[in-house]
Amino acid sequence: MTKVNSMSAAQVTEYILGNKPLFILDVRNEDDFRSWKIEGKHIQAINVPYFDLLDGVEGILDQIPDEQPVLVVCAKEGSSIFVAEQLLENGKSNVSYLVGGMKSWSEHVEPVKVGNLQDGALYQFVRIGKGCLSYMIVSNGEAIIVDSARMISAYTEFADKNNIKIKHLIDTHLHADHLSGGRELAEKVSGTYWLPPKDAEEVSFDYSPLDEGKEISVGGTTLTVTPIYSPGHTIGSTTLIVDDKYLLTGDILFVDSIGRPDLAGKAEDWVEDLRTTLYSTYKELSEDLIVLPAHFAKMTELSDEGTVSARLGELYKVNAALNAENEDLFRTMVTNNLPPQPNAYQEIRQSNIGKLNPSEDEQRDMELGPNRCAIH
């Protein structure tokens, strides 16, 4: 029997960012598929649960194309290998399975250059399957990493390849949808870990307080990262201005939406803070700042280069959540449009403050599914 081909999450990402067509047969159950799937401009996907294919794939052969690559996807990879082999035996030749399944898709991180800085550059690390965005700010061979994913090898391997020394790790807020790698990476590289103090009242480890106005320099140059206190998603949420050009908004402002205020159970209390940040604090900033958020919700938010960004002034024209006529309308808009809460968000918060120490398998399970930090 011909051995079925494999495709890694990195290779699938190349299809998406390269706008190349790919047909996906997702054999997970219907609920999992509806909740979270691989998407892209030229991705076509159908869902046929694995248990419906145990007796053979003959019933779906007419739905599987012959002229373009076909990728079979399941949760961990085992079921997809079985189905891909059945397709090969029935004459479908250009068939692969996703290595590691949707768990590997959730963990892949792709570095993409955003732009140049003084004697350096700013990179966006796109966790494409989870919709998480983190950043590496580089100057003169030194780096600050912002909102690190738990897969810290993505940053260390990039840094080693480019002769970069990681000096600072910053979390813009206490994350509830994904496990932060900031503290672990700070320990690994002997760097400084920064966290907003109002989000760190229960932490069980040492950190440097990310206070408003505290300038964090990198590379021995005038390039600085300046924090601005901007509560609303969490009580400690802090925005970063980089090189007077970029605005790293964490989970406060996204390209198509805004951050939810309810993941600590304080939606009613924090709606006013969120409005103040969006309608007052950010309004005082330059409209030419480029917004770089910590998440994206839809693949349409990705540019042709694979980055997620927008000019602040443009968002005040097109983002509906920035154009509520009054406070009551804003409050209604926010509290009536909250999506389901992220998977295991309470356990993730407890892990990020150091009160839980989940195993690697437990961490993967906790993070499965899409991020749900945005109000829709």
Image (tube, grey):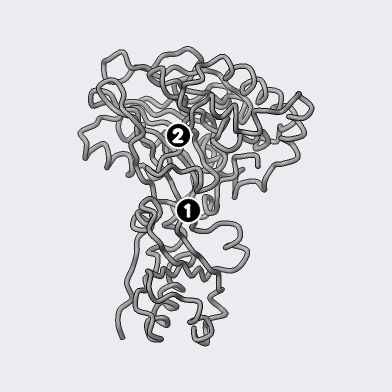
Relative to residue 281, is residue 6 depicted above or below? below
Q: Is residue 70 above or below residue 346?
A: below
Residue that label 1 marks = 364
Q: Position of residue 271 (x, y in %)?
A: 71, 28
**Residue drawn at point x = 37 percent, y = 31 percent:** 145
Q: Quadrant of the C terminus?
A: top right
What element does badge 1 sit on?
helix
Direction from residue 198 to residue 140 in the image, left or right: left
Q: Nearer the viewer, residue 70 or 248?
A: 70
**Residue 80 horizontal/vertical position (percent):** 44, 72
Identify which amino acid the numbered label 2 is placed on: Asp
Distance of label 2 from label 1 (alpha carbons)? 18 Å
Q: Given the image, on which type of amino acid does mark 1 rest?
A: Arg
The residue at the point 48 percent across, 12 percent down is 213
Q: Residue at x 56, y 57 (%)?
A: 36
> Along the horizontal axis of the image, is 121 left or right of 375?
left
Residue 147's tag is: 2
215 w.r.t. 102: above or below = above
Q: Closer to the N terminus: mark 2 or mark 1?
A: 2
